[in-house]
Amino acid sequence: MSVKPQPPGGSAEPVDVQPTAEHLNAMHTGIPFNAWLGAKIIDASAAGVRLYVPWRTEFGGAPGMTHGGILAAIVDLAAYSALRAVGGDGGPTIDMRIDYHRSSVNGPFYADSRVVRAGSTISTAEVVIRDAEERLIASGRCVFLSRSRRFATSG
């Protein structure tokens, strides 16, 4: 079972279809940072997600480099998208690991992500970011806390 994409603050309703790239893009455009980032999911399936991110001047860090925070944001978004594509109940990112392999500027990025494990409490996804020439730029792994996790209240 999957969830229907909702606007920020909305609740997720169960549906019987696996989210498509179109569904996931609609969900992400409702989040201001994701809209600014300009990322588009070009393929989504249970096997993984492929994300396209066009270059923006604001992505620049030191001369000749993309700011590491942008690459981390792409890893987080791609990992979350892969989890949602398999019907996972994605909650907040609770751990993230990024490796930076090469500098790249003035060109688009492609991020390929796949779910390692979609659990009822903790889920993990891996991401690889490449440039238009398919050179490895960065890679990472995100761990998410499921929204279905219940916490005891003190009181």
Image (cartoon, helix red, strand yellow):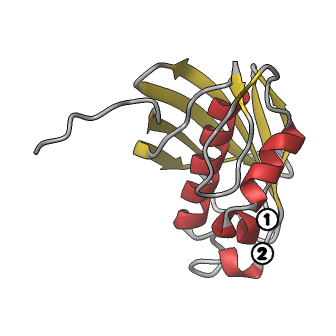
Residue 112: give x, y in percent of width and height.
73, 37
Q: Where in the figure is residue 39, as x and y percent of width and height? A: 78, 58
**1 and 2 marks in contact (CB < 8 Å):** yes
Q: Earlier in the sequence, mark 1 or mark 2?
A: 1
On the question of residue 68 being in view, the answer is yes
Q: Quadrant of the N terminus?
A: top right
Amino acid type, mark 1: Gly
Return the x and y of residue 22 as percentages of the image width and height: 89, 43
Question: Mark 1 to mark 2: distance in Å?
Answer: 9 Å
Give the SS element for disc 2: loop
Q: Residue at point 63% right, 71% down?
A: 65
Residue 15 picture quarter: top right
Q: Is any atom of residue 42 visible in this view?
A: no
Q: In the figure, is residue 36 to the left or right of 77?
A: right
Residue at 79 percent across and 24 percent down: it is 18
Closer to the camera, 51 or 46? 46
Quadrant where the C terminus is found in the figure = top left
Q: Which residue is mark 2?
A: 56
State the image coordinates of residue 114 (x, y, percent, origin top left): 66, 27
Q: Residues within 10 Å of mark 2 (few under 14, many from 20)?
A: some
Q: Is residue 108 above or below residue 113?
A: below
Question: Is residue 132 found left or right of 85 in the rendered image?
Answer: right
Q: Secondary structure at mark 1?
A: loop
Residue type marked 2: Arg
Residue position for label 1: 38
Q: Residue at x 19, y 40 (%)?
A: 153
Question: Which mark identifies residue 101?
Answer: none
Task: Give the farthest residue toward the front.
Answer: 155
Q: Residue at x 61, y 25 (%)?
A: 115
Picture quadrant of residue 109: bottom right
